[in-house]
């Protein structure tokens, strides 16, 4: 498996912050608005540790805190490479009611869609995963060229680096405080329990 990396720093500094209206339109979130604990997960779809978080930590968070109205979780795109950026764009293009399920599906099948030696091969793999998931009405090429979504993702990436000093993925922020312990369910549970 070969990942395609790019330097996106030159793009990042040319993107302005976006309005909450645009961010909310494409947001990937789950939980009640009045939840006492807000968790932001900054992640790249090509990051294997992020996939581990979705497979091993998220299900426990969902069962014990999100579904009970205690936690609201926001999944924030922090792409580390072009493949991650493109996968994030497609995820944000998916209809809101299917977005979070598709995000988890991409992490579940990460090795499958990243199995390519060129970005074109990886893009085709992402498109196939989308179709396999059952989404057939999304204009894949149009979404990849959507500058509003791309600028929003890159703007959020800049804001995360500035506001929370995010440098790697996954990075978790709980109630505006960066989580600095080992990212496992046991440690997250302790942090959440202190806030409720």
Image (cartoon, rainbow, N blue to C red):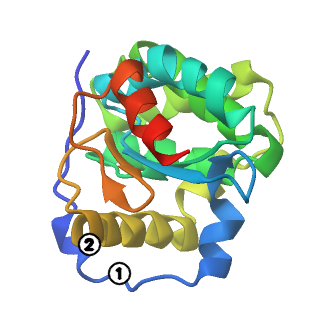
Instruction: Say which quarter of the image contains residue 154.
Output: bottom left
> In the displayed structure, would residue 23 be above or below residue 57?
below
Q: Give the residue displayed 66% in from the left and 42% down from the top.
A: 70
Specify few, some or many for label 2: CA neighbours under 10 Å numbering under 14, 14-19, or 20 or more.
few
Badge count: 2
Q: Give the residue displayed 39% in from the left and 73% down from the top.
A: 155
Q: Give the residue displayed 46% in from the left and 21% down from the top.
A: 57
Tell which of 39 and 80 is nearer to you: 39
> In the displayed structure, would residue 56 be above or below residue 44?
above
Is any part of residue 60 visible from this angle? yes
Specify few, some or many for label 1: CA neighbours under 10 Å numbering under 14, 14-19, or 20 or more.
some
Mark-to-mark CA distance, 2 and 1? 7 Å
Residue 39, position in %: x, y? 49, 48
Residue 15, position in %: x, y? 35, 81
Q: Do the residues labelled 2 and 1 touch (CB within 8 Å)?
A: yes
> In the displayed structure, would residue 62 be above or below residue 78?
above
Residue 1, position in %: x, y? 26, 15
Q: What is the quadrant of the C terminus in the image?
A: top right
Q: Which mark is residue 11?
A: 2
Tell which of 138 and 171 is nearer to you: 171
Tell which of 191 and 61 is nearer to you: 191
Q: In this view, does 138 lie to the left or right of 28?
A: right
Residue 151, position in %: x, y? 45, 72
Provide the secondary structure element on which disc 1 rests: loop
Q: Is residue 100 left or right of residue 95?
A: left
Q: Residue 84 carries which label?
A: none
Is any part of residue 109 visible from this angle? no
Q: Give the residue displayed 34% in from the left and 49% down from the top.
A: 79
Provide the secondary structure element on which disc 2 rests: helix
Q: In this view, does 172 lie to the left or right of 117?
A: right
Q: Residue 15 carries which label?
A: 1
């Amino acid at each position: 498996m070969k990942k395609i990396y790019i330097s996106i720093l030159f793009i990042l500094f040319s993107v302005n912050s976006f309005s909450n209206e645009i961010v909310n339109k494409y947001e990937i979130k789950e939980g009640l608005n009045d939840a006492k604990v807000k968790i932001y997960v900054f992640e790249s779809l090509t990051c294997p540790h992020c996939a581990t978080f979705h497979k091993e930590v998220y299900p426990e968070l969902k069962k014990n805190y999100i579904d009970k109205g205690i936690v609201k979780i926001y999944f924030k795109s922090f792409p580390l490479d072009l493949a991650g950026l493109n996968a994030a764009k497609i995820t944000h293009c998916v209809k809101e009611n299917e977005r979070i399920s598709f995000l988890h599906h991409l992490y579940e099948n990460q090795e499958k869609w990243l199995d390519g030696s060129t970005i074109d091969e990886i893009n085709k793999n992402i498109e196939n995963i989308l179709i396999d998931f059952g989404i057939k009405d999304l204009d894949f090429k149009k979404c990849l060229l959507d500058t509003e979504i791309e600028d929003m993702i890159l703007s959020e990436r800049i804001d995360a680096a500035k506001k929370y000093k995010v440098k790697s993925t996954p990075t978790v922020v709980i109630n505006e405080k960066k989580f600095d312990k080992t990212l496992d369910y046991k440690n997250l549970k302790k942090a959440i329990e202190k806030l409720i």
